[in-house]
Structure formats: C-alpha cells, structure tokens
C-alpha cells in the first residue's frame, strides 16, 4: 500500500518528486528542475531542463546564462510532469516572476511556496492563497519580533532624509534582484520623479524589469554623472557590498541607508555602518507567515530555510501538524 504523500520527498539538496523524476529549486545541477524564482539560492545554471515562469527564465538567462532546455510556465498554467504529476505555477509576490508551485498527484495537493510575501509590491504579482493538503513554506523571518512596517513609512523616512540633507546624497544598499526595483517603484509612487542614480551592477536587472512592464522612471549610472555636484540631493542605489568600498568615494557626502528586513535588528545595522536603516523586506514577516498557514489551512505544514522552531511551536499551539525540513544552500541574502 502506498503511503500518503510518499511521492514527494525532501532531500538536503531540494525537494524531489519521485514519479516525475524532477526536483524543485535544487542546489545542484539536475536533469529536470522546477524553479520558483531567480535568486541564486533557488535558481542556478546547468540543469538539463528548467521549468519556470517567463520572467524567471529571463532572469536566469541574464544572471546564469541559461538558455537551453527552458520550458515556460505562465501563472495559472498546469503542466504535466509525467508519472501522473502535474504542476501549476501561482504568484508568490516575492520578486518579478516568483511563483509558488502547486503539485498534484493521486488526488493529493502540495504547494511549495519558494520565497514569498503578502505585502503589496508594484513590481511583483500578488501572492495567491490556494488550498492544499501540504504547504511547504519558507520561514526566513519566522520569529514574532519580525513584523515589517508598511513600506510607505520606510519610503517616507528615505525622502525625509533626502529633504533634510540637500548637500549630500542618500546611498541605499539594496539587493540587486527585486529589492532595488521595488524601492525605486515605491519612490516613484510616492512622487519622487528625479533621476535615481545606479551602481553599474544594478543596471541590467533594472532594464529587465522595465522590459517586463515595470516602470522605474529616469535611471542613470553613477559612472555617467558629470560631477559629484550633479548627485547632491539625489538617491543612489547600490548593492549592499558596495556601501563601504572605494566606489562610494565618488559620491557627495553620502548618507548610508540599507533596505532589508534585517534592519529590524539594530546590531546588523551597526555592523554595516548603516546610518538610515530601512525595514523593507521581500519575505513574509511573522504575521504573514501565520496568516498564510491559517488561510491555506493545510493538513500539514513543512517549514524550511529560516527560523523553523518558532513557527513549529506556533503550529503546535494552534493544533496544526508541522515538521521542519533540513534543506541546504538557502541563505538569508541581504533580503
């Protein structure tokens, strides 16, 4: 007799779907892979066949030069994987093209969320709540202390700092895929129409977002600025790794900011020398994690890559079955 859900198996290197002989977000190259989104701890080059949304495939081609073996899966489209298994890609709200994957086999439904968030984001399709039997959820911010403020408040802090320091620039460290574009789009929504200056490492991904219909306004490279004076009173976007290196010396008296959910932890801000911490995350916070489990209402929740213990305890206190998975290769990134 076949045990329930024996067809899906968590392994250290990813989630394995045995009847279809396919992996989800594997940390090593495999013959066939389903990929939830383009961040490096979920996507990688070298797979024989990669199945993902069109935007994720475009991101993977840009970042990892993956061209061969790409199979597109639009949101809401159901694909047969073989062995009686189907996959349906659903919006995850994390970054451009990010998806949850609904797997169905023998009447059983499993959702792998990948990374996700529930907060509004003008650069990503909103998370779709979908009932299932097993929910495999991330827990990057799986502690009650992590409650992300409304992004409008954090953007307001950024614009207020700019207004108060017209002879400086505000240098914002932000992850190059997803976070940077979200901050720029939110600045535009708040009425900031001036030029935003970019570190060179940001340009290609911003242009890819624009190619996919995300309006980011007037963006220019710092290397193209005629002088330091041209950037006084401006907002400059750069990868977090560039905040303290020699590149920043070309900027006029920069005030260092960083956009990350980890800015909730003051010690992290101090360690990085961040003067203006902006609590802006592309991951679900504690309330969003528990809300999602409640709304999806699975028979069992599998928790991965994050702070599993607290979320496991919450499930226990709320009479919900749950287990932690021991997957490798998933990082905090700079969120």
Image (spheres, rainbow, N blue to C red):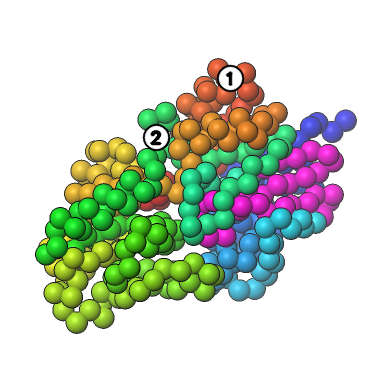
Image coordinates of residue 298 in percent, x first then y, are 68, 31
Mark 2 near mark 1, Cβ–Cβ under 8 Å? no
Q: Which mark is residue 271?
A: none
Spot occupied by residue 113 in the image (x, y as percentages of width and height):
60, 45
**First along the sequence among labels 2 and 1:** 2
Label 2 sits on a secondary structure element that is loop
Q: On the image, which quarter does residue 320 sit in?
A: top right
Q: Quadrant of residue 162?
A: bottom left
Query: Residue at 36% across / 49% down in the picture?
Result: 152
Q: Secondary structure at mark 1?
A: loop
Query: Please, is residue 126 above or below residue 195 in the view?
Result: above
Q: Which residues are magenta?
A: 82-111
Q: Give the CA separation, mark 2 to mark 1.
A: 20 Å
Q: Quadrant of the N terminus?
A: top right
Q: Residue at x 84, y 41 (%)?
A: 106
Is residue 41 part of the magenta span, yes or no? no
Question: In the image, residue 262 lies at what x, y percent?
Answer: 34, 43
Residue drawn at (76%, 36%), measured in percent from left and top? 5
Crowd class of label 2 (few under 14; some 14 to 19; many from 20; radius 10 Å):
some
Q: Which residue is mark 2?
A: 146
- Residue 259 relative to residue 96: left or right: left
Q: 82 or 135, which is in the foreground?
A: 135
Give the labeled residue for mark 1: 318
How many numbered marks, from 0 up? 2
- Dividing the picture into quadrants, the one containing residue 184 is bottom left
Visible residue check, residue 159: yes
Q: Is residue 106 magenta?
A: yes
- Which is more toward the observer, 128 or 21? 128
Report x, y in % for residue 224.
26, 81
Q: Is residue 62 visible?
A: no
């Amino acid at each position: 007799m076949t045990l329930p859900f024996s067809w899906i198996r968590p392994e250290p290197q990813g989630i394995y779907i045995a009847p279809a002989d396919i992996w989800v977000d594997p940390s090593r190259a495999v013959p066939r892979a389903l990929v939830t989104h383009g961040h490096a701890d979920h996507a990688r080059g070298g797979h024989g066949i990669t199945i993902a949304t069109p935007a994720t495939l475009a991101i993977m081609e840009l970042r990892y030069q993956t061209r061969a073996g790409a199979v597109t899966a639009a949101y809401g489209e159901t694909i047969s994987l073989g062995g009686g298994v189907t996959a349906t890609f659903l919006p995850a709200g994390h970054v451009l093209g990010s998806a949850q994957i609904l797997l169905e086999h023998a009447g059983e439904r499993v959702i792998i969320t990948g990374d996700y968030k529930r907060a509004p984001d003008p650069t990503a399709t909103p998370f779709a709540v979908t009932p299932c039997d097993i929910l495999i959820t991330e827990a990057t911010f799986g502690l009650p202390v992590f409650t992300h403020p409304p992004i409008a408040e954090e953007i307001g802090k950024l614009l207020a700092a700019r207004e108060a320091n017209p002879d400086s620039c505000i240098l914002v460290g932000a992850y190059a895929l997803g976070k940077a574009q979200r901050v720029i789009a939110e600045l535009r929504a708040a009425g900031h129409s001036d030029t935003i200056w970019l570190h060179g490492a940001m340009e290609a991904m911003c242009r890819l977002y624009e190619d996919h219909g995300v309006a980011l306004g007037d963006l220019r490279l710092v290397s193209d600025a005629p002088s330091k004076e041209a950037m006084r009173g401006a907002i400059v976007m750069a990868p977090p790794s560039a905040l303290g290196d020699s590149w920043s010396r070309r900027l006029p008296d920069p005030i260092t900011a960083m956009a990350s959910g980890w800015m909730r932890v003051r010690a992290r801000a101090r360690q990085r020398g961040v003067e203006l911490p902006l609590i802006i995350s592309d991951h679900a916070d504690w309330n969003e994690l528990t809300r999602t489990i409640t709304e999806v209402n699975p028979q069992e929740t599998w928790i991965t890559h994050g702070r599993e213990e607290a979320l496991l305890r919450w499930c226990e206190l709320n009479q919900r079955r749950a287990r932690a998975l021991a997957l490798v290769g998933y990082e905090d990134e700079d969120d």
